[in-house]
Image (cartoon, coloured by chain):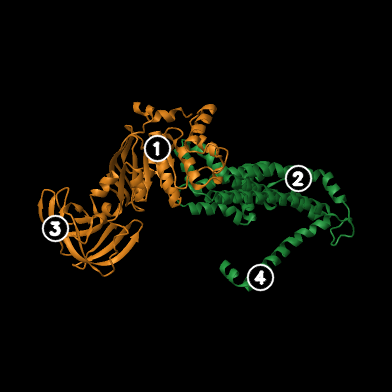
Chain colours: A green, B orange
Amino acid sequence: MRATAGTWPVARWGVLGFTAIVLVYLVIPTLVIMPLSFSSESFLRFPPPGFSMRWYEAFAGSADYRAAILNSIKIGVPAASLATVLGTLAALAVVRGKLPGRRLVGALIIAPLVLPQIILAIGLFPVMIRLGLIGTYPAILLGHTVVCMPLVFITVSSSLRSYAPTFELAAMTLGANPWNTFRFVTLPMIKPGVIVGFIFAFTFSFDELILAMFLTSPATRTVPRLLWEQLNFQMTPVIAAATVVLLVLTMGLLLVAALTERHTRAGRRTEG
Amino acid sequence: MNQHLMADIKRTAASADKIGAIVEFDQVAKSYGAVCALQPTTFQVGAGEFFAVIGPSGSGKSTLLGIVAGFVPPTAGAIRVNGTDVVSLAPYKRNFGMVFQNYALFPHMTVAENIAFPLRMRGVSKADTAERVRRMLGMVRLANYGERRPMELSGGQQQRVALARAAVYDPLLLLMDEPLGALDKNLREEMQEEIKKFQAALGATVIYVTHDQHEAAFMADRIAIMRNGRLEQAAAPRELYERPLTPFVASFLGEATLLPVKEILSQKGEEVVVKTDSGLKICATVRSIAQAGSSICIRPENVVLGAASKCANSFSGVIEEVLYTTGSIRYRVRLADTQTLLTARIPSHPDIALLAHGERVEVGWRRQDALLVSGD
């Protein structure tokens, strides 16, 4: 594919143009929300008739949003932490372990990310009711852990695959037991993958709507769920302002993730 | 937590004097299912000995090293280090040092931190660690490189750091897996001498795996030649070269013309007369009882060109190939039986005229230079 695009300029321009169109269609609608959030009018209308910061003020002053943001953090941080621990352990087992059927296990771990979340939500809903957890923090926290774990699993797996296990063997000959080998050698080597995985997991949890709709209650309501509910009742630009804040936060975190990855890749290159 | 490390393997009284361990391999074997990676192997490495293991890839030399290091559990046998069987010990309890082909220096630690790592794992005090790291850096001539990252160093320097790291805790045994494999030729030769000096200074026992026969011959006190998961012969380099036990050993270490033997015509003590597959009658020397299915081994430098009638074996032949290599000329001579292609190497000198391709020539060799070796 790459060879074709490289040798034939026509193909290369075609691919480039296609990419540009996809980006325009994907990104532009997202960006439309930005001018809307500065609208002076009380309806979501494009283009906005005038400029004002009142919706940001409204957003900042809203107790509902404050509670929802707090909830999103209360759920996102522990869910991402749990997913990071479990995803890292799973990656170690699948990439470095010798368990039979490793490919199948890897595929199963990634499944919650690939399958539509609605399926997981429908499955989790009765389970959480049965456990008496529905609407509580543990319910949504566990639900998010399940969908976030594959993200960590993927980033940590690729970190582990980027270097030969000779480092671990060397550590062992030097007198490091398995725990010390992990702590002083493996973990520092896969640290970028773990950090990026955690950021992905947190942003995913922070933006997730479907599981939140099934598993949270008004008391544990997250930002996406609040936005959804508000869209059903009122169409004020507060929603736009809230969305912009979310967008900036998410983009910022993803930027950090991208920089972390790029930094390590540059480091590895000099090393080779 | 690490006090037991040292206690796990008893050091002999002599080792306090920085003499490496005695390592005994007793019927050590490894198979993966039906595939045999290492046949039952028995040999001993002496205290402070530099022991090289060579062989083609897949010959079992890496398996052997993996078993010693503790990465590969053997299917059978024992490895005794100063009399203690280490087979059931985890790698981190064996107290061996290992140098890897790609050095395996931890990229997230400085050079000094890398060397300090094994001491840290053993709970050595900070002051003591700093002192030993400093001494080690001096020993490998990298005194000012402690704060650098491994990736900032050249290949040869990284190699020296790896050596220092593997030796800083006075391991009972140093294992080296193709440690010079990634270096270019000149640097490799320099490092060979350096490693030899380093080993002598430490008095460590070394097991050194390489595929480079010249490196092994230059560095090792003794060499083990492996083939198809089997130890063919273990001996001093000179003995291996001059008295190979098998045709494989003869051809793997140095160059040799091997002539398959069809029939033993007579044997009297060490003197034997044989007929080759191609029908040549050759007077040869044998160290043991002559067997059918053996070969005659002739080293190229022992072949006489020209006035060869004085030799016990003398034949006429035709020059088929002439090759000049620095300092010597290498000829390939087709003997009159038309099947045998003999390799001869004579020192080059400005006065010596080069023989031409297709020229007729008398070739010969002494009885004691034709060695009868048994086996396939």
| Numbered disc 1: secondary structure | helix
Label 3 element class: strand
Q: Residue at x 31, y 45 (%)?
A: B223
In the image, what residue type sits under mark 4? Answer: Trp
x 36%, y 57%: residue? B326
Horizontal and vertical percent for residue B335? 21, 65
Nearer to the camera, A217 or B145: B145
User: Residue B248 appears in which quarter of the rendering?
Assistant: bottom left
Question: Alpha carbon of mark 2 to alpha carbon of mark 1: how far?
Answer: 67 Å
Q: Which residue is mark 3?
A: B274
| Residue mark closest to the camera, 4 vs 2 | 4
* A180 relative to A65, above or below: above
Q: Position of residue B130 (x, y in %)?
A: 53, 30
Amino acid tagged 3:
Val
- What's under tag 2, amino acid-wise? Ala
Query: How far is mark 4 from mark 3, CA to CA?
Result: 76 Å
SS of the residue at dot 4? helix
Q: Is residue A37 left or right of residue B222?
A: right
Marks 2 & 1, CB-CB < 8 Å contact: no
Question: Which residue is under mark 1?
Answer: B199
Q: On the image, numbered disc 2 is attached to which residue?
A: A68
Q: Which residue is mark 4?
A: A13
Other residues around mark 1 within 10 Å, as few (<14) / some (14–19) / many (≥20): many
Who comes first in sequence, dot 1 or dot 3? 1
Q: Report whether residue B376 is seen.
A: no
CB atoms of marks 4 and 3 within 8 Å: no
Q: Nearer the viewer, mark 4 or mark 1?
A: 1
**Which circle, 2 or 1, is nearer the viewer?**
1
